[in-house]
């Protein structure tokens, strides 16, 4: 009986010893397994880190190349900019030189124009600068200008109208005269007083036409005085009507101005006056 108990206890003890050994073995196996897992994890992390290092290294190399490329481009741009600045300076210098040449050329052109203009200006209007006076003179009938030249008449721009032969009425803005003492034939224009240069020029040449080569007013004769009385009330002018119709002499001169400006209106309103002026132009004597 005792032996049996002993054997049972021996068996139980053996089982405990075996279980303990198995536990120790299991713990060792577990430790070894954990160690293996840790080693595997380490290797895995190591591999992943190595891949990241390789990837980052490639990216870094690319960034270096990009940087070098950008530096090269920047240097090229700097070089181009310096070249552009130099080209800009060179172009500006050429522009300045061309502007100087252009200015010199313009001066030469103006001088040449003045020379040509002076050469082309008839001596009888050489003293005149006003373009309206010159334009009105150029528009005159050729035989009226021929009469003006044949009498050695001259146009003058003046501040004050003067005469050695005639008394100048107050308010006179232009004056046709033949100076008996000097034999000078001239038409003077008060430049500060005239508003309608065209009309005034034609009006004064109307006096010249009236006088003709004899330098005597034909409008003082009976034929024209009759026309004057018949048609002065029908006369139309955009100038000074009272002055234009004040005397037969002024009426004749102003009628020539209207003939030059609006012959159809003159013909319609005052046909006899129109015919007289028309005939006087065609038959200067």
Image (cartoon, grey):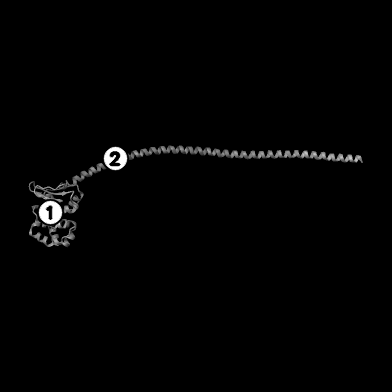
Q: Which residue is drawn at 30% across and 41% down?
A: 99
Residue 248, how many percent across, how many down?
11, 57
Return the residue at label 2: 101
Q: Residue at x 21, y 44 (%)?
A: 114
Residue 199, how many percent across, how many down?
18, 54
Residue extending farthest to the right is 1
State the SS at label 2.
Answer: helix
Badge 1: residue crowd in 10 Å (few <14, some 14–19, many ≥20)? many
Residue nearest the viewer, comparing 143 with 48: 48
Classify 225 as above or below 156. below
In this rendering, the count of numbered labels is: 2
**Is residue 140 visible in the rendered structure shown here?**
no
Q: Which residue is drawn at 9% across and 59% down?
A: 225
Q: Residue at x 18, y 60 (%)?
A: 265
Q: Residue 218 carries which label?
A: none
**Is residue 107 visible in the rendered structure shown here?**
yes
Residue nearest the viewer, comparing 95 with 177: 177
Classify 280 as above or below 16. below
State the SS at label 1.
Answer: helix
Image quarter in which the N terminus is found: top right
Residue 94, how many percent across, how many down?
33, 39
Contact check, label 1 and label 2, Cβ < 8 Å: no
Badge 2: residue crowd in 10 Å (few <14, some 14–19, many ≥20)? few
In-image side of 129 versus 38 (left or right): left
Residue nearest the viewer, comparing 21 with 245: 245
Image quarter in which the C terminus is found: bottom left
Residue nearest the viewer, comparing 140 with 244: 244
Return the residue at label 1: 207
Tell me which numbered mark, 1 or 2, is placed earlier along the sequence: 2
Residue extending farthest to the front is 170
In-image side of 19 versus 113 (left or right): right
Determine the CA span between mark 1 and mark 2.
51 Å
């Amino acid at each position: 009986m005792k032996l049996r108990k002993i054997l049972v206890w021996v068996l139980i003890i053996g089982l405990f010893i075996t279980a303990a050994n198995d536990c120790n073995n299991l713990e060792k196996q577990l430790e070894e397994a954990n160690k293996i897992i840790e080693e595997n994890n380490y290797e895995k992390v190591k591999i992943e880190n190595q891949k990241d290092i390789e990837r980052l290294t490639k990216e870094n190399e690319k960034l270096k190349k990009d940087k070098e490329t950008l530096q090269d481009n920047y240097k090229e741009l700097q070089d181009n900019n310096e070249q552009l600045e130099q080209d800009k300076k060179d172009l500006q210098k050429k522009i300045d030189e061309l502007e100087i040449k252009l200015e010199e050329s313009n001066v030469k052109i103006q001088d040449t124009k003045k020379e040509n203009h002076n050469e082309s200006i008839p001596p009888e209007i050489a003293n005149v600068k006003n373009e309206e006076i010159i334009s009105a003179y150029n528009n005159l009938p050729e035989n009226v200008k021929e009469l003006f030249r044949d009498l050695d008449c001259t146009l003058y721009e003046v501040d004050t109208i003067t005469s050695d032969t005639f008394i100048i009425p107050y308010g006179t803005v232009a004056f046709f005269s033949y100076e008996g003492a000097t034999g000078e034939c001239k038409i003077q224009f008060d430049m500060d007083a005239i508003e309608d240069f065209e009309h005034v020029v034609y009006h004064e040449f109307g006096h010249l036409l009236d006088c003709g080569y004899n330098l005597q007013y034909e409008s003082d004769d009976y034929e024209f005085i009759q026309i004057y009385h018949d048609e002065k009330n029908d006369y139309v002018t955009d100038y000074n009507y009272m002055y234009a119709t004040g005397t037969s002499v002024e009426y004749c001169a102003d009628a020539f101005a209207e003939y030059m400006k609006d012959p159809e209106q003159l013909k319609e309103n005052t046909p006899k006056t129109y015919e007289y002026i028309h005939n006087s132009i065609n038959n200067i004597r």
